[in-house]
Amino acid sequence: MSLERPDRVDDDDAVERTPDELEALLGDLVVDRDDHLNAPGFVIRPDTVQETLRTLKEQAGYDHLSVVSAQEYENRYESIYHLKKYDDPTQEVSIVVPADKDDPVSESAEPVFRTADWHEREAYDLIGIEYDDHPDLRRILLPETWQGHPLSMDYDKDRPQIATLPEHANPLEDHHKDAESDTMFLNIGPHHPATHGVLHLKTVLDGEQVADVEPDIGYLHRSEEQMAQSGTYRHQIMPYPDRWDYISAGLLNEWAYARAAEDLADIEVPEYAQVIRTMGAEMCRIAAHMLALATFALDINGDFTATFMYAINDRERVQNLLEDLTGQRLMFNYFRLGGVVWDLPEPREEFFSKTRDFLDQLPESVEEYHNLITSNEVFQMRTIDTGILPPEVAKNYGATGPVARGSGVDYDLRRDDPYGYYDELDWDVVTEDGGDNFSRLLVRMREVEESAKIIEQCVDLLEDWPEDERNIQANVPRTLRPDDDTEIYRAVEGAKGELGIYIRADGTDKPARFKIRSPCFSNLQTLPEMANGEYIPDVIAALGSLDVVLGEVDR
């Protein structure tokens, strides 16, 4: 079947170890067990983080650090490293690192997993945990002058905050020009069309080449995690996911929360609703990739009248279908825990006909985009062999989605950690081996065709579904109160990559901790690897190829 991984090998890293075998491998590093719903959890001392993670990475094959969750308790701080395998993400393990309440210091994981750099900086910024041996431990979402840590228990939200001008000064202290140096500091953004939102790139040039580039995020921080922690599982959280990646990934975002909460509360979604969810999610994926295609062409060729408007036109046709299905064009709020809010629009035949009409014209549109873009000599010169991201570097940064698959990393949660109705359908995971800006675009264009195949099969199933078995929702309790200290991390394959949710329950109807694993956050962290040594136009191309949405990066 097409969903079987073609590269699966029988080596020691691919063998699934039991929790007891993992504990034996870690030996004295483990001080306690803390099983989560999705993975065995091992509690370790805060000074053994690197040794523990390196053992799991090199001897057990856990090469994907999905996310670092951090939180404060009454008697301690805690960091949780959620580990998976790129070769088999169903093999998961959680490394729990408690830190002293009065002196919250823990060893940094950055020397083992490069992606821990940004994740630990966020934990320091918002929670207040300090990480020894971190190469650059400073705030990442808030200004350096910010007082306190917003998600800590003693945070004073009424305290006045002042961001002083020196915080935004030129980082090159010596302002001079001489014959020996061509070094120059250049601000790109935060208010610039090519940064795809409010993103500031602190760029150092050596002559015309990029010596260093640092993404400066946090301009769009909206406290999404805190708002989710203030809402009830059953009714109040679901409207928020649409607003993370607010452009077109609404149903994909909703599914990330739904999957985590449904597994947390042991809710089984009816098969009919799973098919509807799968169809709607792939419509959102096409809409997202069409926007990525449109804006990327605008970044590279400045092509607004043809490519941009053509792609937006196809995106609008998808949005029309999603509006028919959900009643909204962007903020859908269509998923419910246990299913969807209502059945397909009536008359159903008209909805199916409109969907098939869109699918029928899509191959011709994709072919036209290839003629306009991938066959364009200028576009090829700007994107082929620029923005190179080697596969092992992509893994080390926790890159996922088209960014990772464009580097040949064969990782897709729809196939590798099945949910919804994906494992019952015939489709292929798309990869490209180039690892450059061109390859990432090709992955998205080919994924549009695979999404169309999935939608067509869903329509076939829904057309023939027995009338008396069209059950759109499971029987969900009016109030959900998962057991105290129950923890789970669940993820779906969003348009940009692995979109995950970590939830810790405290026995009430609201989460005690709600952490969003944004694929854009980890993907954006790879930009310096792609841009250093390139020219300024190549930086813009590399950033466009990442397809980031800053509302999801900052959350």
Image (cartoon, helix red, strand yellow):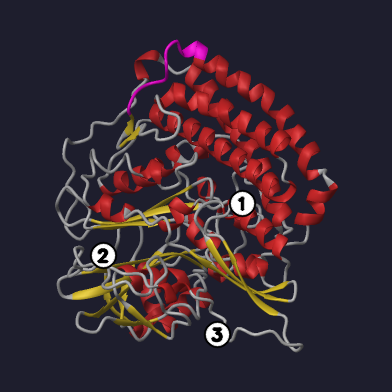
Is 346 part of what is drawn in magenta? yes
The residue depicted at 37 percent of the width and 85 percent of the height is: 48
Q: Quadrant of the N terminus?
A: top right
Q: Earlier in the sequence, mark 1 or mark 3?
A: 1
Work out whether residue 68 can be spotted.
yes
Residue range highlighted in magenta: 341-350
Work out whether residue 95 can be spotted.
no
Q: Position of residue 99 (x, y in %)?
A: 26, 79
The residue lying toward the viewer, choosing from 520 and 50, is: 520
Amino acid at dot 2: Leu
Q: On the image, numbered disc 1 is attached to which residue?
A: 5
Q: Earlier in the sequence, mark 2 or mark 3?
A: 2
**In this picture, residue 362 sits left or right of residue 201:** right
Is 327 part of what is drawn in magenta? no
Q: On the image, numbered disc 3 is attached to which residue?
A: 173
Q: On the image, numbered disc 2 is attached to which residue?
A: 151
Residue 305 occupies which quadrant of the picture?
top right
Q: Main secondary structure of the magenta part?
A: loop
Residue at disc 3, secondary structure: loop
Judge whether 150 appears above or below 1 on screen.
Answer: below
Q: Position of residue 87 (x, y in %)?
A: 56, 60
Judge whether 84 appears above or below 148 on screen.
Answer: above
The residue lying toward the viewer, choosing from 6 and 508, is: 508
Residue at disc 2, secondary structure: loop
